[in-house]
Amino acid sequence: MVVQAMRGQLKKKEKQVDKLLDSAVAERFCRLAERVDSLRGLRERNPGNTDSDSLTESINVVINNSISAPVAMEKLESAWRDYSLAQEKLKACPTKEQLGDLIDNRNKVRGVLAATVESFLQEAKCLPVRQRMDKLKEVSSSLTAVFGPASMEGDVGEQAFEQYYQWRTQRSRLTSSVRDGTDKALKALCTWSENVGKFFCLSAKTVVGVNDIVDGVNELLKQAEINVAKELDSPLSVGVSLASSQMSPYSLFIVHYF
């Protein structure tokens, strides 16, 4: 009697455990499905920040299509320094005997300066300044159409564009990394689901074995849950905290408002 009673209790507990396991698995899949549905909606609402993309493209134009200083600029600065020095020596000449040599030297340096200026002007004429101005006006008009007129009040750091461009690139990489992780985890779960379907289909031959649908299923489900939760919990401004301490006020203005 005692043995039968114990067997009855064991069977009852086994049924309770099976029921709890079934409920736990169902709840996990249900929660995951709900979160995946939320994530799908989030991706549809935020396929990409086209406004920020247009700003990034414009900054890229400003940074990478700038006009380099003429090669003759360095020579011109050097020639001007030599001429200024010759003039100073001439003014400070204490005796008439030295004037002749100083004047000759000044005239010689002045000739070099004149030739250097001419060379600089010829090189400057070939610079695509007009094309550059037209391109910048085009970019300005495009940005104004998207963001409205800009105010340049305050201190605009010289490296603001470069800092924003680096921040934007870093953020894009981080966002892509998070999404890729989610896609990879869900794809693995989909592959497992397909194998389950093939295994239980008795009307067709399959190479899928029991181990293919049993081994690692908990890990697949866990990884999918982790990656989906990570993407849902990641703010769109991921990366701001990494860049804020190194960015100028104007850069942060761009980051937070564009």
Image (spheres, rainbow, N blue to C red):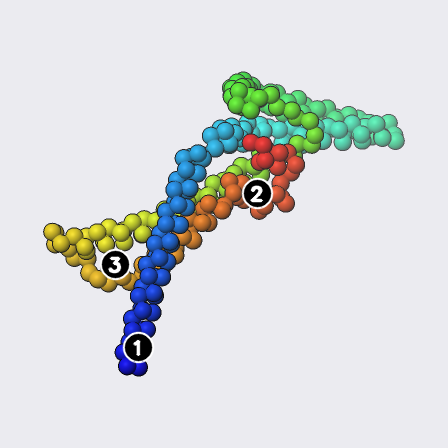
Q: What residue appears at the point 42 percent right and 51 percent down from the top-left corner?
A: 227
Q: Residues within 10 Å of mark 2 (few under 14, many from 20)?
A: some
Q: Is disc 2 placed on a helix, strand or loop?
A: helix
Please state which of the two labelled residues, at mark 3 or mark 1, is closer to the viewer. 1
Figure quadrant of the C terminus: top right
Badge 2 is on which residue? 240
Figure quadrant of the N terminus: bottom left
Q: Amino acid at mark 2?
A: Val
Res. 5 mark: 1
- The answer to whether 113 appears left or right of 235 in the picture is right
Q: Amino acid at mark 3?
A: Ile
Q: Amino acid at mark 1?
A: Ala
Q: Is residue 137 above or below residue 69?
A: above
Q: CA distance from mark 3 to mark 1?
A: 37 Å
Residue 90: horizontal and vertical position, in percent?
81, 28
Badge 3 is on which residue? 213
Q: Is residue 193 visible?
A: yes
